[in-house]
Amino acid sequence: MTRKFALTPDAVGDVVAIWDYLASSSGAKVADRVLAKIYDECDRLATMPGIGHHRIELRNPIYRVWSVWSYLIVCRSNTTPVEVIAIVHGARELSNLLLRREDDGGDASGR
């Protein structure tokens, strides 16, 4: 099956960090289930890119945010395949995080 979304290198690092954290605190089966749900939701975003939410602090409307339990998936809605640029805990402050992640479309704040 071909994925309808692409993970940036930073997002791959996020996935690895999430799996490592969950595996060490709750076990590999829990980590696998959480990542499977995250990937399912990435597929859903790719199928319906308009379902993500805009976050006012990001200012740039190409960025969409979708929550999966306590995690946020941040993607660019104007790419094919949909480009996932971050998968982080919902407590993270997104604008500073995304400003540090350089991408082809400029910074996430829209500045």
Image (cartoon, rainbow, N blue to C red):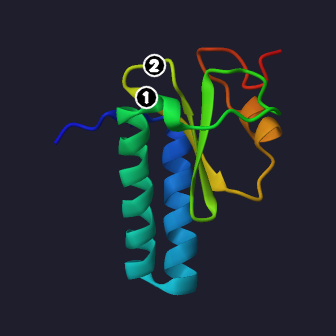
Question: Residue flagged by tag 2: what amino acid is it?
Answer: Thr
Q: Residue at x 81, y 48 (%)?
A: 93
* Residues marked 2 and 1 touching at CB (< 8 Å): yes
Q: CA distance from mark 2 to mark 1?
A: 5 Å
Which residue was labeled with disc 2?
79
Q: Residue at x 59, y 15 (%)?
A: 104
Q: Position of residue 54 (x, y in %)?
A: 68, 32
Number of dots carrying numbers: 2
In the image, residue 9 above or below residue 90: above
Answer few, some or many: residues within 10 Å of disc 2's Cα (few below 14, many 20 plus, some between 14 and 19): some
Q: Which is nearer the eye, 27 or 33? A: 33
Which residue was labeled with disc 1?
82
Left or right for 14, reference 100 = left
Answer few, some or many: residues within 10 Å of disc 1's Cα (few below 14, many 20 plus, some between 14 and 19): many
> Which image quarter is the C terminus in?
top right
Specify the quadrant of the image occupied by residue 2.
top left
In the image, residue 104 above or below residue 10: above
Question: Residue flagged by tag 1: what amino acid is it?
Answer: Val
Q: Position of residue 35 (x, y in %)?
A: 42, 62
* Label 1: element kind: strand
Q: Residue at x 16, y 42 (%)?
A: 1
Q: Position of residue 13 (x, y in %)?
A: 54, 49
Residue positioned most to the bottom: 26
* Label 2: element kind: loop
- Mark number displayed over residue 17: none
In the image, residue 64 above or below residue 111: below
Q: Residue at x 38, y 43 (%)?
A: 44
Specify the quadrant of the image occupied by residue 79.
top left
